[in-house]
Image: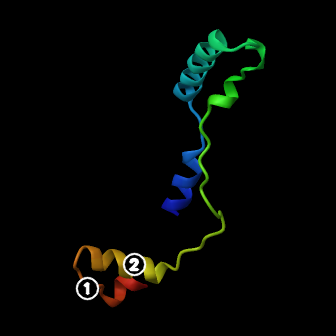
Amino acid sequence: MWNQYLRRDLNLQGKTDYALAQIAAEVRRVLHKNPRQVKTEDFLIKFNTGPQDERVDPEKSKAFWFALIAQPPTNSELE
């Protein structure tokens, strides 16, 4: 679930992203032969997040995290 949030959040652009993209576009327009061809959207970074349907087995995830913190899981924690 956390991975799904991070994948979705990675490509969401906020106000800061648009402001920086607009500044970069304006700088590029000054140097470009045809300034009207430069679009702000061209400067928004899009990340390739891979397949969106990836399902994680909860038992494997629990086992991984319990091994990471060096605490053996009890039967009630695995349910």
Q: Amino acid at mark 2?
A: Lys
- The quadrant holding residue 49 is bottom right
Q: Is residue 64 above or below residue 3?
A: below
Q: Seen from this angle, which residue lies furthest front?
A: 33
Q: Residues within 10 Å of mark 2 (few under 14, many from 20)?
A: some
> Which residue: 72% across, 23% down?
39
Q: Which mark is residue 2?
A: none
Question: 16 or 24, which is in the foreground?
Answer: 24
Question: 75 or 44, which is in the foreground?
Answer: 44
Question: Helix or strand or loop: what does disc 2 sit on?
Answer: helix
> Which residue: 56% across, 54% down?
7
- The quadrant holding residue 54 is bottom right
Q: Which residue is mark 2?
A: 62
> Which residue: 52% across, 63% down?
1
Question: Helix or strand or loop: what does disc 1 sit on?
Answer: loop
Task: Look at the numbered discs 2 and 1 and tell me whether their residues touch, using CB distance below 8 Å.
Answer: no
Q: Is residue 12 above or below residue 59?
A: above
Q: Seen from this angle, which residue lies furthest top?
A: 30
Report x, y in % for residue 38. 72, 20
Report x, y in % for residue 74. 30, 87
Report x, y in % for residue 69. 24, 73
Q: Amino acid at mark 1?
A: Pro
Q: Which mark is residue 72?
A: 1
CA distance separating discs 2 and 1: 10 Å
